[in-house]
Image (cartoon, rainbow, N blue to C red):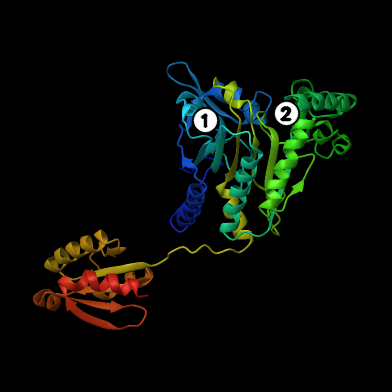
Amino acid sequence: MKAPRGTQDLLPGVTEKWQFVEEKLMEISRNYNYKEIRTPIFEHTELFQRGVGDTTDIVQKEMYTFVDKGDRSLTLRPEGTASVVRSFVEHKLFGSPTQPTKLFYIGPMFRYERPQQGRMRQFVQFGVEALGSADPAIDAEVIGLAMEAYQSLGLKSLKLVINSLGDQTSRESHRQALVDHFSPYKDELCVDCQSRLTKNPLRILDCKKDRDHPAMNTAPSILEYLNEESEKYFIQVQKYLESMNIPYTVDKNLVRGLDYYNHTAFEIMSDAEGFGAITTLSGGGRYNGLVQDLGGPETPGIGFAMSIERLLMALEKENIQLPIKENLDCFVIAMGEEENLLAVKMIKKLREQGIQVDKDYQMKKMKAQFKVADRLNSKFVLVIGETELENNQITIKNMNTGDQVTIDTEQTVDYIKQAIQGE
């Protein structure tokens, strides 16, 4: 039996890196006053059809959808925003006197894609959503949080790309311009883009198959169709980013792959050597209108999501070593039944004080147990032999210096605590 294609087992030695990264992301989110939200791994299929958009590749090709025993169509979540907004509406979080509602999430998502480096069928996303503010300053805050998340882990080869998709009026003008532009080339486009031409022509700009078509380079930019309000909003976002000393590049062709985006859109990419053809680490943008689409009141929102797999991949490409603890505080060696009873008692006391401790559970001889302590890179070894048991003492060996002391059993916990703190 093997894990399904596009999934992976994260084994000890790797999970510690995931834990470190996830804890860092949550710490930064809390510093920005974002609170964690946890939503179901599967939702009603309609949520993603309405929230993500019928014309997206996610909904059309990539969702894991099934019918349950109650004949209901359910889907493993392919992204996090729709679920968060559904929860925001269902639990009436818009009624809280403290607005905007600032949330973060982390968990597995599922898309039926061709597995490749940094892209899995089950993958983990970290994301934030800020709901209830139309202030361009919160756009800059969300972007700043994403940038800080990467930089706090040591990444330097980063590129922030931003664009504006405009408001509804701007998008309608741009939509017609795209239809007029691509119509003469309709027969040269892929089947998907031929369909998008009438349903959602903006998606053509995001097509992977037609990206090299000459018409892509001459397609009208949304920036040419921004009305005064949208243009002013975009300029303000840029001013906030500049005041925060966050470098960025405006990319007029940047189009996010989900239907709910408007106004600010952004992606953060890795420029690290050898990262690969797909350089995007994370992306997001503003989605004024999504809350209404899912049955809530008019509520502006903005957010982003990042792949943990691609984050770890970027760290590897930049040769960044995470400060993962790879040693054990204590290893207890005991010979004989009575000695083991004392060892178990002592281990419990040490663990209650937050000290990381383990012992042999395979009845090895003393020399073999020392070898185990060595392999575990234990700082200290506590030895309980016949002599120690008779004298109510424990021998403690510092594995780094080789120094050894014998002290009363009752003093052992305090001694180890002070020794670890003094390192």
Total numbered labels:
2
Viewer-nearest of discs 1 and 2: 2
Q: Amino acid at mark 2?
A: Asp
Q: Is residue 225 above or below residue 281?
A: above
Q: Quadrant for the N terminus, please.
A: top left
Q: Extreme left residue here? A: 390
| Residue 154 image point, x, y percent | 59, 61
Question: Which residue is tagged 1?
Answer: 83
| Residue 96 image point, x, y percent | 46, 30
Can residue 122 be seen here? Answer: no
- Work out how far the residue at label 1 is from the one at label 2, CA to CA, in angstroms: 23 Å
| Residue 94 image point, x, y percent | 50, 28
**Circle 2 SS class:** loop
Q: Is residue 210 above or below residue 348?
A: above
Specify the quadrant of the image occupied by residue 229: top right
Q: Is residue 196 above or below residue 120?
A: above
Q: Is residue 399 left or right of residue 112?
A: left
Residue 167 marker: 2
Q: Residue at x 18, y 78 (%)?
A: 407
Q: Amino acid at mark 1?
A: Ser
Q: Residue at x 22, y 69 (%)?
A: 413
The 10 Å Cα crowd at callout 1, few under 14, some 14 to 19, many 20 or more, is many
Q: Nearer the viewer, residue 395 or 30?
A: 30
Q: Nearer the viewer, residue 119 or 345?
A: 345
Q: Is residue 374 left or right of residue 362?
A: right
